[in-house]
Amino acid sequence: MFPIINYSSFIQGTHLDTNTTTTTISPTTTQTNTTTISSTQLTTTSGFANTTRTPSPAADVSINVTWTYNNENNVTSVQMIVNHLQAGMWAALGLNLEEAMGEAHVFMCKRLANNTIVINRYVNPHKHEHPQPAGSEQGGTLTPGQQQFNDGVMICQFTLSNFTMETLRQLETVRPLSQSTSYHPLFAVGLLNSSNEPLKHFEDSHTALSDHVQLNQNETILYRINSTDDGESLTFVRVHGTIMIFTWILIASTGALIARYFKNSWANTFICGKAAWFAAHRFLMSTAATLTVVGFLFILVYLQGAWVDKGPTRYYAHSITGVIVISFSFFQPFIALFRCEPDSRFRFIFNFIHAVIGFSAFILSMATIFLATYFKVLKDTKARILMIIWIVWIGLIFIIFEIMQYHSRKKLNESGYSNINTSNTTIGEIVESPKSSTTTLTHFVNQEENSPARKSKNVLLAIHVLVAGVISIVMVVFLFSSS
């Protein structure tokens, strides 16, 4: 989380802007927004080599953070309640733009050896450098309130106010704190040295939450670091990811390839009176549309109907590209229901719209899944590398099929046949009423079916299905193996 090292240069006991008068908030005359964050059971064990692992001093620590926002004077009042924090330890709340440890605004509550409670504010400019004391120039004035320790419960109170734009200054890579910006809450627990300066947090007692919070919004976030609870809470996320991975990597890609490159090869093979390529394409894409909506419902249930907070984050970008993909997938089958007759002179309009929407959804799906590889549930460079491999593969397979298609069209033109892939009438005859195909067309289709090119295309399609299937399975394994 916050990289606090043994020889930290923190100023012990420093509190900032002590000349600022604490603002009293009256609940009877002002409107308040409340945010509650609960981080429970920050468990850890000692990690020294060749020794028996024993619970660390932070094993039973729990942190509850509540803040209220007064919209009349723009003051945020914060209260940190820390249970079972031993003397000579610290607990901290961090606010970061990304769901990661490192560059963050940090509010640290310390319990000294004599049970004196001290609240300090810092910023972490980089992941592995000294945290630096922060003042109002980093956004808002921190005014300490009541600090107390009773019956094993430590209470730290402070306010944040005076967020004036004129005094803001970016420190290193950390943007100034803002009440209207969405942040990921971070938690950490560690020890104090003999000078009451913070040592590095315990290795297993720090976490970054995927939730978004703002200092001026009414939000409630409950977090438990217990591994069993976390696994159960992420079940809906993992099911959502599994459905979307198989849908867009395996099913949709195969359906798109069949529709674009197998009109000739499979035109004389029928399923329920329809050309095999059309029947396969319709089945695969209908399945993809249905699964996409189902996958969306899982993540909707997980988020309890809430929308990801707007901001310059990968979560928000994922939500935008994702909802576009879902919308395209939902409406695409209905658009197909209202297509013109095959011999209509306006059929090309449907063909164009259908292709644009389909390929747009497919391309956006790759971007959406790639963004998800940065999330906590799939935060693994292996998954990201696998997605890059997938993007390269899908581009390569389309290029190979396009080359084969080009040679097929060239051969067709030299033979004097009309282009089956660009002629609406002939395609329509094969799709809607294949038995009415012309003799010339049937002759060409028979030639295509018996050609080496057709066999090569079938083999290439089989290889694609195998590659897409393996990538999908491995991605899902990464999804369920992440902690």
Image (cartoon, helix red, strand yellow):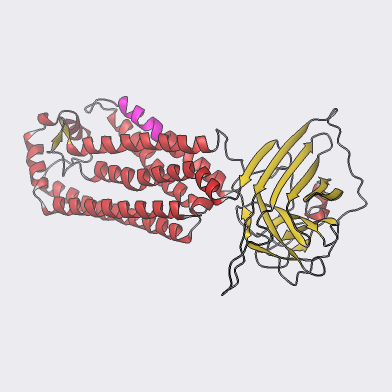
Quarter occupied by residue 131: bottom right
| Residue appearing at x 53%, y 48% in the figure | 228
**Seen in the image, is 424 located left or right of residue 19?**
left
User: Which residue is rendered at x = 19% and y = 32% of the image?
Assistant: 431
338 or 141: which is nearer to us? 141
Q: Position of residue 189 (x, y in %)?
A: 69, 58
**Residue at image point 40% right, 58% down:** 386
Is 357 left, or right, of 316 in this rendering? left
**Residue 226 sits above or below residue 297 on the image:** below
Residue under the image location 70 percent in, 40 percent down: 36
Find residue 39 and report its horizontal and vertical position in percent: 66, 48
- Residue 337 belongs to the span the image colors magenta: yes
Q: Nearer the viewer, residue 85 or 466?
A: 85
Q: Main secondary structure of the magenta part?
A: helix
Which quadrant is home to the N terminus?
bottom right
User: Which stretch appears magenta?
Assistant: 329-340
| Residue 299 percent location from the top left of the image | 49, 39
Total numbered badges shown on the rendered structure:
0
